[in-house]
Image (cartoon, rainbow, N blue to C red):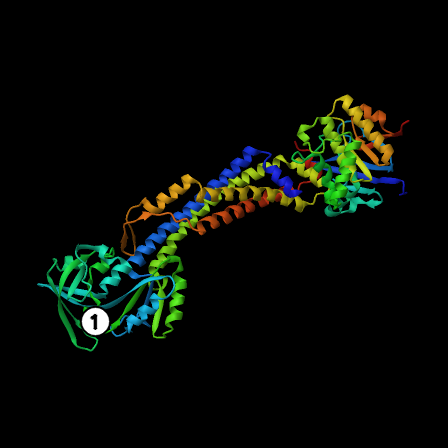
Amino acid sequence: MMLKIALRNTLRQKRRTILTSLAMIVGFTLLSFSIGLSDGSYSFVINMFTRNRLGHIQVHHRGYLDKPSLYATINNYQAVGQTIQNVKEVETWTPRIYSVGLGSIGEKSTAIEVVGIDAVREIMATQFDKKIISGRSLSSIPAKESILGKGLAEILKADIDQEIMIVSQGADGSIANDIYTVVGVVDSGDPLRDRMSCYLHIKDAQEFFVLEGRIHEIAVIVSDLSKVSKVTERIKVKLSNSSLAIAPWQEFAKSFYQAMQVDQQGMWIALFIIILVVAVGVLNAVLMSVLERTREYGMLKAVGTKPRQIFWLVLYEVNIIALASVVIGTILALGFPLSTLINYLLAINGIAFPEISYGGMKFQTALYVEVNARSIYIPAITIVVSAMTVSLFPALKAALVTPAKAMRTH
Amino acid sequence: MTSQQVIVTEDLTKTYSANDVPVYALRGINLTIAAGEFTAIVGPSGSGKTTFLNIISGLDQPTEGKVWLSKELISNMNGRQLSDFRRDNIGFIFQAYNLIPVLTVGENIEYIMLLQGIPKIERHQRVVDILEVVGLAGYIDRKPPQLSGGQQQRVAIARAMVSQPTIILADEPTANLDSKTGSELLEMMYQLNKKTGMTFVFSTHDQAVMDRAQRLITLKDGLIDSDNMQE
């Protein structure tokens, strides 16, 4: 009976119910949109940072990340890579070699970081070819070619087809030195890295450093960013090699991950403000409704209704409106043609956004909306719980009316 | 207290505080109302009629004194006990009807029985029967706003009586009605009183109620000014 009264009470003051519901629907939509926008944009930035450069997961020789060393290598990397490739939701992988040296073109010399890459796999994994701003990519077979980072090319005043001489130390203790033709210049978006990076074909790099069949890193790309942790665990199980360390991007790019987390706190503050505005609106409506019906609650108590029954009567009313609003909000977020169109446009094109930077890295990006389960269930729970919370006081007020006094009110 | 006495008050006193000044609404009322009486409590505004009715119905607590209703000392009961006691023993008729506007006539009447835990079939039968008695058969699915004032008060009477309480307390039940409708309702309540033996206690200004009452108790300044049985 209380549920029946509550349901009919919601239709009693239709205008107020519609306004309360509208506040909740707008709140729901704003929350949903904010979360979607935040998730979409963060996914985009994280993808740029990981998918386009570092990889979602990295495999190294144990201890390499803490203390990079020429000798801390992954042996038989092709077999390791093939095992990784067979793990569910792994899209691709690519091997890398890292070491330092001295690079010279003509009379210009500077410290460089030699990065050995598999030209074909690197393109599949990180779209390396799209970052080349002049010249071309490395040949698929080793051909003593090199690609320089934009900053490094500027320091060495390098032109395409010029030769760069690299001097370093080989893994066998010998002096490594060789000459490579500059075939391209790359802008990775990381100016610090681009001031040092000199990319060689992985076979050339192995030969140069006397690391035959060995590499330092395998970068793994997964098909779904949200599955990185799961895939990491699967790879750990598959490899079960105690000499290898498998880390998701949250671990090997810890400072970036922490920066993202701090940034996301800002989103929660914005969400809190939206919730607060909705909650005040709901509180106002419920309080007005309770005050208007004081006489009725007095009568209900006079004839033997328990305070808790009246308490729930008020909460039922709020819940009915909140649940209806959430359903309407969800339909609007998912099914309404205009909303779908907006989401579609934002998901495809994003909102133009100025260049942003994380830890010195620049991202020419856009704001993208991602409609996911989180962007529906968080607003839904938030709206219902906040509406319930602010209704506790009016419900308590209704439950505790003194019948004789309440029935004297008009 | 004999088995015939349904309401007994002993030195009933009620004092309010208005701006730290004590206001004496009741100043020691000693009264006994027997089962089946049709009693009117009258008096000028501020004489203590409503306060008296509120206290003997357990809606308010006396400052001092005791109240027994159906042999139960209600002035010592806590809120929960009073709530259950009112539900099972007292029927209320209010001046402004106080029906639940979103419920139908049938549901309004059924409400208290639902609180009492009476099974659905019995509830429905009682609703049909009582609507017949109050002359509203066929109105079971109407909502209060669709009824006239007189019809709404009939529903309120039906609601008060359907749970078969010992006492019906009516606070100015005819005050919002025209004299003809008021007289009709009064006559109906009188007949129900005779037929069922339920005790009716009115608080009223209505001369027709005073004339019809079997017993007329007049309050003045919180005291019983007169207490007369009428022919």
Residue at the spot of label 1: A206
- Vertical side of A336 occupied by B149: above or below: above
Quadrant assignment, res B175: top right
Q: Where is residue B70 in the image (x, y as percent from the top left)?
A: 84, 43
Tell me the residue at 25%/55% (across/down).
A189
Q: In which quarter of the image is the N terminus of chain A?
A: top right
Tell me the residue at 41%/39% (across/down).
A338
Marked residue chain, label 1: A
Q: Which of A159 and B210 lies nearest the eye of the viewer? A: A159
Q: Position of residue A320 (x, y in %)?
A: 57, 43
Whether residue A173 is visible here, answered yes or no, is yes
Considering the numbered disc 1 on the image, is that residue within a helix, a strand or a loop? helix
Bin the neighbour count of mark 1 within 10 Å (Cα to Cα): few under 14, some 14-19, many 20 and up: many
Q: How many marks?
A: 1
Q: Position of residue A117 (x, y in %)?
A: 23, 65
Whether residue B218 is visible here, answered yes or no, is no
Q: Which amino acid does label 1 sit on?
A: Gln
Quadrant assignment, res A360: bottom left
**Left or right of B187 in this view: A137:** left
Q: Which of A264 and A204 lies nearest the eye of the viewer? A: A204
